[in-house]
Image (cartoon, grey):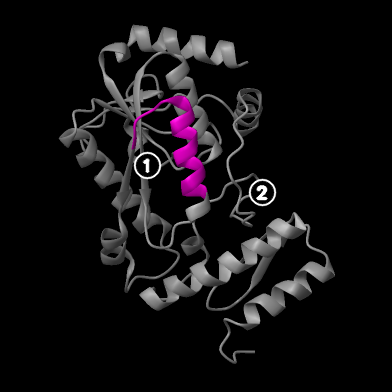
Amino acid sequence: MIERAVEDIREFSEENGLYERRILVLFSGGKDSSLALYLLKEAGLDVSALTFFHRWSWRETLNWAMGFTKSLGVEHFLVDVTDGLLREAVGRKGPICINCKKVMLWNAKWFALNNGFDVLAKGDNANDKIIGALLDQCAGDIRLCDIPRIGIPFFRPLIKYTAEEVEALAEEAGIRPYRMYEHARRRQWREGCPLQYIDREETVTPELMDLAYGANYEISKLARRKKVRMSVRVPSFEIMCWDCDGEALSEAREVISRFMGGKE
């Protein structure tokens, strides 16, 4: 499967002049973006990685991402978006993922344009929702989109692969990202950052962001030890877990009791 995927990218890249362009991959360190980066590198494209992080990002996944790009011999840029995220998110209703994506998209655009990159690449697969997004403006093949509003083309080498196919390709390539054992918002491994667990309709504050990080960091350690997927919403302290038994839930309640401040 890997050989076929790499060959498909080579053929598409030759047809669309991508070998004459510098490509910057928006690289989270998750399975999709890791596979996209790996395939583009294997196809012989001029590719670099860009990772955004903020004060509440998981440091473990960032460390894994840095090791992965080093193993590929890929140039890797790290950009701290804490200040921009605070400006966009504080005072708004949670969760803040949409605000964070906005900050990252526009930072990616200007980083690419200011540093001589011609194309941005993403790890979107066929299961990702794209209706209503900027990338719906694609006039032709959805793998490569020229978006006037953004001002730089987007390349999505995995967009025609299902999530299951991406899993199989990543396994064949030996790509096994560090897991925080988050519950996530979908059954598939779709981890992100702890700020996604701020309760909906809750007004976001820096203190609430700190709470989301602290509580979920401790819960993730329990989840990893129990080999279950678990997260906690804040400030409601609702525990979410895949495959938890009574013992795991009891230990989780003990963990979050330290963050509840007397709340029952």
- What residue is shown at x 48% (from left), y 54% (from top)? 59
Quarter of image, res 188: top right
Category of crowding for the residue at label 1, using alpha-carbon neighbours closer than 10 angstroms: few (below 14), some (14–19), many (at least 20): few
Residues rendered magenta in the picture:
61-76
- What residue is shown at x 75% (from left), y 54% (from top)? 227
The percent position of residue 159, horizontal first and vertical second, equals: 48, 28
Disc 2 marks a residue whose amino acid type is Arg
Label 2: which residue?
A: 187
Vertical side of 30 occupied by 99: above or below: below
Label 1: which residue?
A: 133
The percent position of residue 261, horizontal first and vertical second, equals: 56, 89
Can see residue 129?
no
The percent position of residue 97, horizontal first and vertical second, equals: 42, 57
Disc 1 marks a residue whose amino acid type is Ala
In the current view of this chain or complex, which residue is farthest to the right? Answer: 246
Vertical side of 232 occupied by 43: above or below: above
Q: Main secondary structure of the magenta part?
A: helix
Quarter of image, res 177: top right
Q: Quadrant of the C terminus?
A: bottom right
Mark 1, secondary structure of its residue: loop
Can see residue 119?
yes
Residue toward you, 44 or 90:
44
Residue toward you, 39 or 197:
39
Mark 2, secondary structure of its residue: loop
Residue toward you, 149 or 73:
73
For this view, does 74 lie left or right of residue 257? left
